[in-house]
Each structure stands twice: as C-alpha cells, then as structure tokens.
Image (cartoon, rainbow, N blue to C red):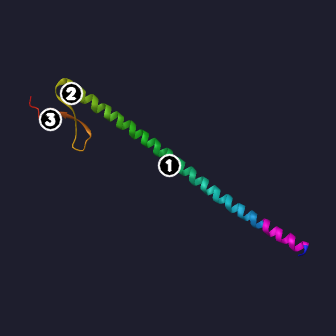
Amino acid sequence: MSARHTADTRRIQLRLQRLELRHLRGVVSEQGERLAEQDQLIADLQRRLADAEDALDYRWQQTIELGERMEAEGTGRLGLSIDGTLCVLTNTHAGVQQ
C-alpha cells in the first residue's frame, strides 16, 4: 500500500467517524428534548394530582364538619353511601322521625 492510499483511507475513515458523531449528537439531542418534555408532563401531572388531593381533603373535612354539626344539632349524622363514600345523612334519610 502506498502512503497516499493509506492517507486517503484514513481521511475517509475520519470523515465517516465525524458523520457518525454528528448523527449520534442529533440522536442524543432528540432524546434530551423528549426527556425534557416527559419531565414537564410528569411535573404537570404531579401538580394536578396535588391539587386534586387538596380538593378532596377539603371536601372530606367539610363533610365531616357538617356531619358533626348536624349530629350535635340532632338533625343528621355521618354515614356511608352505597358505594362506600362518606356522606351526611339527614334524619329524614336515616329513617328517623321527629
């Protein structure tokens, strides 16, 4: 093999390596963008979940307070609905006659 042929072969190999590196950088960049989008979606979902939990806690507390107040007044009590959720039963719903 001549020195010129060896140098040409080496240049071609280097050019191919640079092209491959460019391609890999593009792939890594795309993957990074996708990960950033997924991170943003996860953060949004976590915020929405926290908001929903806060709203549920608030409604739960309001239901308990109302049930306790009605029980103290003798007008109702806390109970469970058919599907197992907490609810306030008035004496009329509970079958109590006044």
Precedes in sequence: disc 1 or disc 3:
1
Q: Write the residue at 86% across / 71% down.
A: 6
Three-letter code, disc 2: Met
Residue identified by numbered label 2? 70
**Which residue extends farthest left?**
97
Q: How far separated are the C-alphas under marks 3 and 2?
A: 12 Å
The segment highlighted magenta reads 3-14
- Badge number at residue 94: 3
| Coordinates of residue 31 in the picture (x, y in percent) | 60, 56
Q: Quick one: SS at disc 3?
A: loop
Residue 79 belongs to magenta span: no
Please report the residue visible at 27 percent of the width from the left and 40 percent of the height from the top: 85
Q: Quadrant of the N terminus?
A: bottom right
Give residue 13's position: percent from left, percent from top: 79, 68
Q: Say whether disc 1 or disc 2 marks the residue closer to the N-terminus.
A: 1
**Other residues around mark 2 within 10 Å, as few (<14) / some (14–19) / many (≥20):** some
Q: Residue at x 50, y 44 (%)?
A: 43
Q: Main secondary structure of the magenta part?
A: helix
Q: Nearer the viewer, mark 3 or mark 2?
A: 3
Q: Amino acid at mark 1?
A: Leu
Count the marks: 3
- When asked about the image quadrant of residue 60, the answer is top left
**Which labelled disc corresponds to residue 41?**
1
State the image quarter where residue 29 is shown: bottom right
